[in-house]
Amino acid sequence: MELILRDGASPAEKQKAAQLIEHVLPGEPQKENALSITRAAASIVLLTAYITGPAVLASNHWTSFEYWVLTGAYVLYLAEKSNKPESSWQISFELCEMAAEAALTALVEECEQQKDLVQGFPLVDGHTYRARVTILVGLLSALDLSLRIRRKPRGKADFIRSFLSIRLKEASMWGESAVPYLFLAALQAHQSYVEEGLAIQLVREISQANGASATGRGIPNPYYSPEEALRLTYGLDWLNSEQFLGHSYCVASLIDFLARRLRRQALAGLWFGVTRMALLSFIPANFGEWFRWRSSEGVLDSRLPGEPQSWASLRDAAETIFLDGLPPTLRKRPSFALWFALVFPHRFTPATARFIDDAVSKSGV
């Protein structure tokens, strides 16, 4: 009831939606037959149709998109856990994809009609304006890149390219959950000086804010939503004292990205700051856990960058990232992986970033 009665203009409440979905799904999918899996997948799709109702009425396309991608992820969770044929859940998953794409398309059309991106009272919108731009450049890029990967018509490609050329300079990083948005925007720009420059800037900002010698509390990790991160930044969450200094979840993916593009000198200039942080990555215990909003089974991997670091070994490591650790259902759906990285920023790992990077590179221009 809280989800259905929620203000449609609000951001998606992914934590509550995930809890609700997990209560609807069977506790042990591997013990269910194919018909039960079909019914379970259809049930959460129907449930999401109710949950997204307020957002649809408010034309909140971002929230609609997030709920449908979240539901699509749980359909893949069912698939991985049950190991049933695709025919038992594929239709439900495709409905989630179609709804998510429709939300992104509607968002692009709304952006075309807007003269500016200001919302609410202009004098105070500056606190959220740049975060809004970051979300928009990421979402619009996700739509066009997914269409490229699937070889589908890209009717809005010119507008999206123009939007990025104007707005990308206004984007900012509220926390590490913003990195997937900016990563997709960099890939969409398709200009080496833009995509590599943006990755360099992100590594530098995170290193300066979260390095061992930094002051303050650091940049919030990818488990913090834009709204939650902004509340910390502006001192509105008085009860939260979490510190983020000394580690990063996203820098490793960006380092690999730059190493694959042979940006040796740029990385050399960044390396001192990088070595002042531990590079973290959560590894779910099994493929099904990848698609849960909060995995209860897995390992938090932590490593320190080499000091000094061999360029040859760094480049080899970036080029030979094993994708076998990604769920097979995700590896078969690279266009959905783009959306998944935005909605589940805590699953934006070096393997996820490499998989998306490869999929976009193979798609052409």
Image (spheres, rainbow, N blue to C red):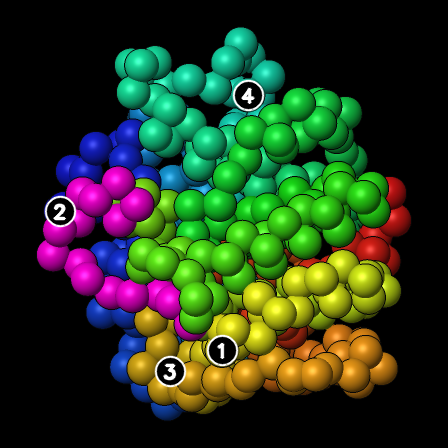
Q: CA distance from mark 2 to mark 3?
A: 26 Å
Between residue 94 and residue 210, name the one nearer to us: 210
Whether tag 1 and tag 4 are in contact, CB under 8 A, the answer is no
Residue for point 87% across, 43% down: 365
58 left or right of 102? left
Q: Which residue is mark 1?
A: 278
Residue for point 36% across, 58% down: 215
The circle on residue 29 is 3
| Label 4 element class | helix
Q: Which residue is mark 2?
A: 1
The circle on residue 19 is none
At label 4, which amino acid type do we have? Answer: Cys
**Residue 125 appears in view:** yes
- The tag earlier along the polypeptide, 4 or 2, is 2
Q: CA distance from mark 1 to mark 4?
A: 39 Å
Q: Residue furthest front?
A: 213
Q: Which residue is mark 4?
A: 111
At label 3, which amino acid type do we have? Answer: Pro
Q: Position of residue 349 (x, y in %)?
A: 57, 70
Magenta highlight range: 232-246
**Residue 53 appears in view:** no
Residue for point 47% across, 19% down: 117
User: How dense is the environment of label 4, judged by Cα within 10 Å: few (below 14), some, or many (20 and up)?
Assistant: some
Q: Nearer the viewer, mark 2 or mark 3?
A: 2
